[in-house]
Amino acid sequence: VPTLARIDAAREPHGKAEFSAQPILAGKVVGATPKKVVNPATGASVGRVTDATKEDVDTALKSAKPWAAGAAERATVLNRAADLYEENFGPIFALLAREAGKTQMDAVAELREAVDFLRYYAARGLELKQPPLGIFTCISPWNFPLAIFTGQIAAALAAGNAVLAKPAEQTPLIAAHAVALLHKAGVPASALQLLPGDGATVGARLTSDPRVNGICFTGSTETAMLIRKAMARHLAPGAPLIAETGGLNAMIVDSTALPEQAVRDIVASSFQSAGQRCSALRCLYVQEDIAAHFTDMLFGAMEELTVGDPWHLATDVGPVIDEEAEQGIRAHIEKARREGRLLRQLSTPRGGHFVAPTVIRVKGIAEMKREIFGPVLHVATFDAEDLPKVIDDINATGYGLTFGLHTRIDNRVQEVTEALHVGNIYVNRNQIGAVVGSQPFGGEGLSGTGPKAGGPEYLARFTKPEPAPAAGAAAGKADPARIQA
Ligand code: UN1
């Protein structure tokens, strides 16, 4: 990782530069009516984007060709792309801060993850036995506009597919920058095309055209359900949907936890990335006996956070992504304030889409109907004898993405983790920031389809299915990476 001084120097020339994103169809850049893309922290222009039209989607589908090179050559190209990403950290960090509101800490982690995905899938691609499916639609979110955008594409390409990539509407500029690097590394123009645009024009077409052979999606649970319906109507039976969706993630802190450590991990899990991760902590359960003292410590630690423009290296919490996000989260906080449940809120800087870290009291996770995608932590207390009920309530949400546990009771780790239907469990640490390769990431139930991204089973879903194994062969296979301590 470069030093902060080097990061600052490398991104400086890109601090005011105007970037652009346009559809890239079989290598040709098209379109001429650009919309402005603005910085969520300042409202200043970052550049312009041209959305793809329905004709562009059709052109892309006609030009798409699965990547014919052998697995070894594909791996070489993806590794070269990883090198190019690393060399280009200046404009990448500038774009992550200016277009996506990422703090430097988050930007460093995001570039690392994107590079890890490229190298990991390049290596796993060499082990694949089955041929590619054909054409993959990849639809990615604004909260990891480089890492998840790249991870989806790298997986589909490593398996030999052609990719039609639709970046999130809020973050097309970094996507265009990434696609340029992938092409420069040697990914053929017909194997990777970029289609910026909205869900109605671009997303809907890319998920309901019978020429598409599979879909990789990260975003809301509601959108995943719409995609599944469209696929059932229009795509060939068996075309896979590989989806990572929402979460309603809990953490339990019992009276044996180390308070300083738990507080630090809660602050990171709830407020880092302004809470805009599907893995983020939403509902904290603190054991009643320690609750008063513990929440005081938590409020004290929150006070240390600097909220502001992520261009400043000292900023801990940047803006939320746009006006709609800001208003939605604010409405949720205001309701809690009216009901007398607002426990703490930091002061909010002016000028951008800022929501200051906030803590709200709840009785339990059961009353939280949906994921609030921002820096808002909900806190409940529990008595030790009610632990089974807490576990039942967490399972009853139907989501199952991440879970955190702070305890020094050995049996409790086993009891709790066995009872929970959750993809990623973190013990005595924070619950964000899964690591490609060693901590594959993905949820159960409403949180996703599996297999886990950055894990050994992921790539096979991008290939023709293997003939069914003998009955019982794969049954009961434990996932050793599910629990991280
Ligand atoms: C998401 O926020 O859409 O472990 C998923 C983590 C990240 C979460 C990515 N891999 O925090």
Image: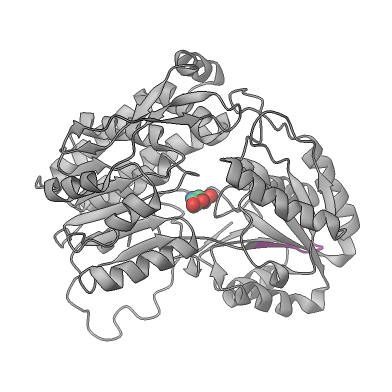
User: Residue 133: x, y in percent?
Assistant: 18, 61
Name the image colouring: one colour
Q: What percent of the width, then of the height, locates residue 123? A: 26, 47
Q: Residue at x 56, y 34 (%)?
A: 101
Above or below residue 456? Residue 325 is above
Q: Is residue 240 left or right of residue 291?
A: left
* Residue 267 falls within the magenta-colored stretch: no
For image coordinates 47% across by 60% down, the residue present is: 245
Quadrant position of the C terminus in the picture: bottom right
State the residue in front, 73 or 42.
42
Q: Is residue 79 left or right of residue 363?
A: left
**Farthest residue, direction front:** 33
Name which residue lies at 39% across and 40% down.
114
Residue 344 point in image, percent of width and height: 83, 47
Residue 1 appears in view:
no
**Against 3, is 327 above or below?**
below
Which span is picked out in magenta? 250-257
At a point 39% along the width and 37% down the height, the residue shown is: 172
**Total numbered labels:** 0
Q: Residue furthest bottom?
A: 471
Q: Quadrant of residue 291?
A: bottom right
Q: Nearer the viewer, residue 313 or 141?
A: 141
Q: Nearer the viewer, residue 305 or 64?
A: 64
251 in the magenta segment: yes
- Residue 63, can we see it? yes
Tell me where residue 381 appears, x and y as whole percent: 82, 66
Up the image or down, 450 lies above or below 28; here it is below
